[in-house]
């Protein structure tokens, strides 16, 4: 199955990476003046059994130095030296340490490859692998408002509005003026001051300036309290809302 195949590949990938964690690339260098009359150098050491056939040739760098890179196991130490083309053995001028080789009566260069924090790297790899195989979460995008949603919203807004034309002196045009100012309920109209209502009418033009809104807040308070009988009795005494 494709799922099983994917798991195998992931497992294989983890194993390879974890194995490679213990290997560290080390670059050995020699200054050009270290060659003397020689024309080249070979790197020999514990990592290639001091075998000339396995020797690693140093290449000339743009700055004139010679260099060679080797992958060595982290946490281990290795002795090494350079064998020049004229048969001369020399040590690394910048070696970490020098150790005496009693068997040959010479000093060798020594390098200690830094240890790697295996646990941390394995955890990082595991996390990446998990992210690679885990199903991606669907990004929730806000849905566009449909006509039905808009209709419901408009219906809800209409539900909180009161019919202000039930107030003596307020017709449909004046009701629209009040709604434009945010006065859409009896309660809101009951809290409005006569001065504010007069300003709304005056701003609408001469046609509306003849209306007197003085009784509208009182009427609205009765309507908001559902005291319809009292409202009707009051309106019988009013002419055009005055």
Image: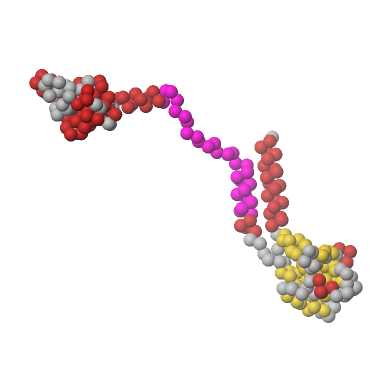
In the rendered structure, which segment of residues is drawn in magenta? 122-149
Identify the residue shown where x is 80% and y is 67%.
64
Which picture quadrant has residue 20? bottom right
Residue ID at (71%, 66%): 113
- Compare residues 183 and 155 and report the one nearer the observer: 183
Quadrant where the N terminus is found in the figure: top right
Residue at image coords 61%, 53%:
123
Left or right of 81? Residue 156 is left
Task: State yes or no: residue 226 in magenta.
Answer: no
Residue 50 at least partly seen: no
Q: Give the side of residue 116 with respect to residue 163, left or right.
A: right
Q: Is residue 186 left or right of residue 146?
A: left
Quadrant location of residue 193?
Answer: top left
Left or right of residue 154, residue 184 in this image: left
- Looking at the picture, does residue 127 appear above or below residue 233? below
Q: Residue furthest left?
A: 237
């Amino acid at each position: 199955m494709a799922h099983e195949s994917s798991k195998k590949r992931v497992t294989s990938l983890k194993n390879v990476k974890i194995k490679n964690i213990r290997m560290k690339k080390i670059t050995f260098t020699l200054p050009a003046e270290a060659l003397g009359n020689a024309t080249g150098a070979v790197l020999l050491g514990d990592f290639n059994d001091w075998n000339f056939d396995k020797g690693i040739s140093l290449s000339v760098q743009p700055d004139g130095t010679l260099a060679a890179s080797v992958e060595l196991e982290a946490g281990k130490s290795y002795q090494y030296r350079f064998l020049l083309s004229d048969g001369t053995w020399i040590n690394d001028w910048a070696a970490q340490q020098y150790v005496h080789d009693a068997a040959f009566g010479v000093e060798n260069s020594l390098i200690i490859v830094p240890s790697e924090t295996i646990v941390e790297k394995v955890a990082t790899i595991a996390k990446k692998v998990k992210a690679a195989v885990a199903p991606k979460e669907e990004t929730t995008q806000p849905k566009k408002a449909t006509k039905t949603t808009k209709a419901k919203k408009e219906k809800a807004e209409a539900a909180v509005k009161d019919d202000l034309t039930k107030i003596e002196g307020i017709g449909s045009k004046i009701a629209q003026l009040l709604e434009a100012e945010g006065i859409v309920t009896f309660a809101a109209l009951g809290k409005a001051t006569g001065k504010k209502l007069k300003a709304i009418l005056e701003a609408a033009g001469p046609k509306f300036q003849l209306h007197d809104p003085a009784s509208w807040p009182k009427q609205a308070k009765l309507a908001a309290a559902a005291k319809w009988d009292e409202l009707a009795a009051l309106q019988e005494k009013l002419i055009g809302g005055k």
